[in-house]
Image (cartoon, rainbow, N blue to C red):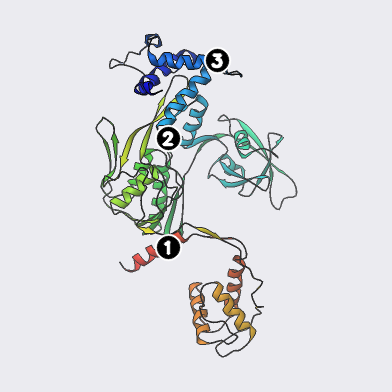
Amino acid sequence: MKKYKKYVLPILIILILISSTAIGYGQTLIADNSSSVIPAESASNTDDNLVFISDIMKFIEDYYPYDVTKDELTVAAVKGMLRSLDPYSDYFTPEEMAQFEQQTSGTYTGIGIQIEQKDNYISVVSVFKDSPADKAGIKVGDKIVGIDGKGVSGMTLDQVAGLLRGNEGTKVKLAIQRAGSNSLLTFELIRSKIKINPVTYKVIDGIGYIRLDEFNENAGEFMGKAIGDLKSQGIKSVVLDLRDNPGGLLTSAVDVARYFVPRGKIVTIAYKSEAPDVYYSYLDNVPFKLAVLVNGNTASAAEILAGAIQDRKAGVLIGTRTFGKGIVQSVVPLDDGSAIKMTIARYLTPADRDINDRGISPDIEVPDPVVKAPLDTSNLAPFEYSALKVGDKKLAVYALEQRLKVLGFYDGSLSDSFTLNTLKALNKYQKSKGLKMTNTLDKATYDAINKDIDKLKNPTFVDSQLEFAIKYLNALSRHK
């Protein structure tokens, strides 16, 4: 096999050419400077690579005990060559290419809902604003039990999603089970083009929070709307959440970066033998104090944005080291709808860092979120309401201190005596909840404590990274 190593590139060209008759993609990929195509027949029949590949294919056809076509073998060979380069290069069949285009385009034809499969039901978890589903009255929490007269029980999530999609302007009828309704609800909707919004945002403790799921074609547009709304609310600090963002389109990453990165370089795309492409920001006034959340699944285009923010001092990165995908792929469409996706360049951060296989270290490392196990309440003393105060000595004081300790406000030894340490912990709790500090256990505080303890009886998601970012930005605002 060693003598064939020097023919890797010719093999790629020949495979494309010899398959052009069978699956129709060879004529558009290879051309000389005058743009004339090289016909498949021009490949030399005596070329070692062609002979080698042909012999292997003939051997398989003669001796493999099951049916296999030359098309299948050719596709497998091309996939094998591209995948051998790196995990991101590949050959897409027409079906795979259509799916890839849908994923990156940011649009699809359907009714505008997100669904999940839980407890053997297909449930609606999100309804896109102004979509057919929104206009028809579909609600979050609705369970889909039928589509066009067919029950969906036993179907996979992908199968149900496939039934909901279709050509623009076509109708689809849903049978919905809704909490509080004794009978099934029926909705007839007309499918339309749905623009996928990868941006969600809200305000937490006076801090803007923007979550960016991916860099599809709509990322820049919806990021601009989110930023505009937050500005109109007077928000001065923002947490940008890029955790678990797998990346997407380079152009979208640049579009989003131009909302956060000051005037200057964003990223350099370095090719093998061509001059690099350099993308710039033209932002004169950075609108927010910025904290960016990253983790091990922050990858590719998300790392372009994170790297630019870090190098240009536009904000602080909080979390764990990013994934480390610092290479760029180009997709070459072919005649029959298939395509080649191949790595063509590396990208460098504004400080010329190559982060491929290295990732980006955050400025402040904070562990990933965890799910806390449910609180075992079997050892908690009975907690009947009493207006407790300093000097009281009863079981209810012990029960109060237990609960304040569980909630993180009391760190002393437990006793049945209401001491100044008990009062200090109680006042600290009341202040944290925005309650009046009365120097006693009043009914409002009693109810709040019980409510917080009840929450801990279920598994609790603790997002220490987001909590740290909110505290960091609030502290930064106070000291400016």
Disc 1 or 2, which lies upstream in sequence? 2
User: CA gap, disc 2 to disc 3?
Assistant: 30 Å
Question: For mark 1, does the 10 Å Cα neighbourhood hold few (<14), some (14 to 19), or many (20 or more) residues?
Answer: some
Q: Secondary structure at mark 3?
A: helix
Q: Which residue is more in the foreground, 408 or 7? A: 7
Q: Which callout, 2 or 3, points at the residue further toward the start of the chain?
A: 3
Mark 3 touches mark 1? (CB < 8 Å): no
SS at mark 2?
Answer: loop
Q: Is residue 413 left or right of residue 144?
A: left
Helix or strand or loop: what does disc 1 sit on? helix
Amino acid under disc 2 = Tyr
Percent coordinates x, y for residue 209 in the rendering:
43, 56
State which quarter of the image contains the N terminus: top left
> In the orientation shown, which residue stands out farthest toward the right?
182
Q: Residue at x 28, y 53 (%)?
A: 285
Q: Quadrant of residue 247?
A: top left
Camera-nearest residue between 142 and 33: 33
**Mark 3 lies on residue:** 61
- Between discs 3 and 1, the one toward the N terminus: 3
Q: Quadrant of residue 176?
A: top right
Q: How busy is the neighbourhood of tag 2: few (under 14 within 10 Å), some, or many (20 plus)?
A: some
* Residue kind at label 1, given as amino acid type: Phe
Q: Residues within 10 Å of mark 3 (few under 14, many from 20)?
A: some
Give the x, y percent position of residue 351. 26, 47
Residue at x 43%, y 18% (from the top left corner): 15
Res. 238 in view: yes
Where residue 182 appears, as percent x and y from the top left, is 75, 49
The residue located at (38%, 40%) in the rendering is 252
Labelled disc at residue 88: 2
How far is mark 1 from mark 2, CA to CA?
Answer: 34 Å
Residue 11 position, x and y percent, is 39, 19
Where does label 1 land, which residue? 468
